Image (tube, rainbow, N blue to C red):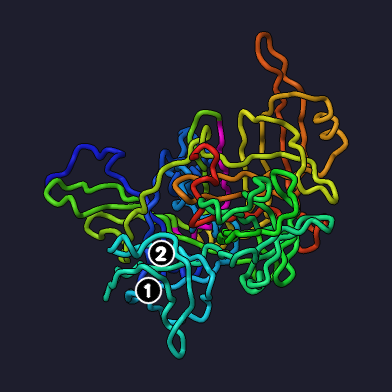
Amino acid sequence: MALRHKIDSNETSLFYAEEESLGVLPAVPVWIPLEPNEYDDFGGELTLLARNPINSSRQRKKGVITDLDASGGFQQDFTQTNFQDLLKGFMFANYREKPNAIVTEVTGTGYTVADASAFDDGMLILASGFEDPANNGLKLVTGTSGSPATSVLVAGLVAEASPPADAKIVVVGVQGDTADITVDMSGTYPKIISTEFDFEALGIIAGEWFFVGGDEIINRFDAAENNGFKRVYRVNGNEIEIDNSNEVMTADAGTGKNIYLIFGRVLKNELGALIIRRSYQIERQLGAPDTADLNALQAEYLVGAVANEFTMNIEQADKITADIAFVAIDNEQRTASQGIKAGTRVPLVETDAFNTSSDFSMLKLYIRQPGVYAATPLFAYLTELSLSINNNVTPNKAVAVLGAFDVSVGTFEVSGEATAYFTTIEAVQAVRRNADVGIYVAVSKANAGWVFDIPLLALGDAQNDVSQDEPITLPLSMEAGTAAKLNRETDYTLMWVFFDYLPTWSNPNNV
């Protein structure tokens, strides 16, 4: 063996696998790669207690290890893909997904799937993972075939008898027939109405954000204010009532238009039986100590790791990043002779980082008022913004256990901080009177994106910062709570919506 004198940080790698139960991996774990920028206290911190008896030698005696606190944290850039799965752990929930399916064959007329019953005429699907480029991208479903239905019919495909194992299709929206999708302004809130589509059956829920309009003129309303991101207030069959829009909408019959409505997958903190505590094993590979066998890797693991803290960092002229931390029940090490744990290690999905200068479609901090769906922002611009989740996870200790045997989970807390450019004293007064406030952020890039929405929060601080030769700024603290007081159907604190597809013009900077 030719032992190395050192191992560089660039030789390390980070993976995680979801456990079957706390501390127990499934038979064949799937290890997903991560992209850490930096680490924070990763591993096990041992508590050493020295023996210090009263004695004439004035010396202590060898101590003993009495406790182990296993935890770990790291920061990585926030991309379209690298946090989607992990966020389920921090939100203690599953995604509410639109229909999707793995494709086993492509014919000249359709995608073959195990069950095509969830797909229907007029749906927009995004196909990905196919070898022939013609089979990837946004497609319009024209129907299904087979008995039972196993083929999703789409025009313009190229036959692939055996597509890659990860080739799939996912519903990302609908296209209305000519003049089928309209805007109704007869009530308190605007409504999107269709005679063709049942939005409840599509799984659209209160609080969900969606996008109106496609890249082609025929696929969006003539009035610009009727297009773009909208939030669902209530769904009733073929009607979507809207309680949040960047602009005041107008009635539109959709004459001559085949309107696109684009949907995403929804993740929110759930209630009751829908609350799911996940645990993970997090593997940090530490390189090979023997120059004669660089494939014999050593590693350390956080075992029974439960997602505890998440902080998204949004600062001017920067990348969007997130710091995350886990509380674990144990920390393990494996030597090069033992090797890393078995399982399937999937390749990293390469996606670009989001920048804070040109990848934002929307960012609004606003006062919530009954009947107002296009509120004026409290501040025109922010210099920085952070969003934090804290699950208040604590390890459970016991006699005869080094580490923890379980963890307890506390209150789901969502908070944040922001610094705004001061413009009017009314904004400061709104903080003082404890006004109902909401905030939402929409980011899009390369025909995909996401929205996070806190529908109800309270603001604090708000002490003007006045410095010579500088604009006045206003630091703000944010504490969120359930929005049930505003709409009983929105009994949650935080919602994410990830869009697998968005039109290019969803971000004004892309046009």
Determine which quarter of the picture holds residue 467: top right
Q: The residue tagged with tag 2: helix, strand or loop? A: strand
Residue range of the region highlighted in magenta in the rendering: 303-315
Tell me how far mark 1 sits from mark 2, CA to CA: 9 Å
- Does residue 319 belong to the magenta stretch? no
Answer above or below: position of 492 versus 166. Answer: above
Name the residue tied to disc 1.
103
Residue 130, percent from left and from top: 32, 64
Determine which quarter of the picture holds residue 477: top right
Determine which quarter of the picture holds residue 237: bottom right
Q: Of label 1 and label 2, which has the lower sequence position?
A: 1
Residue occupying the point 42% across, 55% down: 282
Viewer-closest of 124 and 210:
124
Which numbered circle lies on residue 127?
2
Residue 486, percent from left and from top: 82, 55
Which numbered circle lies on residue 509?
none
Q: The residue tagged with tag 1: helix, strand or loop? A: loop
Q: Are marks 1 and 2 in contact (CB under 8 Å)?
A: yes
Horizontal relation, residue 461 to residue 99: left or right: right
Give the tally of numbered discs. Answer: 2
Horizontal relation, residue 213 to residue 446: left or right: right
Residue 202, percent from left and from top: 61, 71
Q: Residue furthest top?
A: 468
Viewer-closest of 164 and 321:
164
Residue 181, percent from left and from top: 65, 63
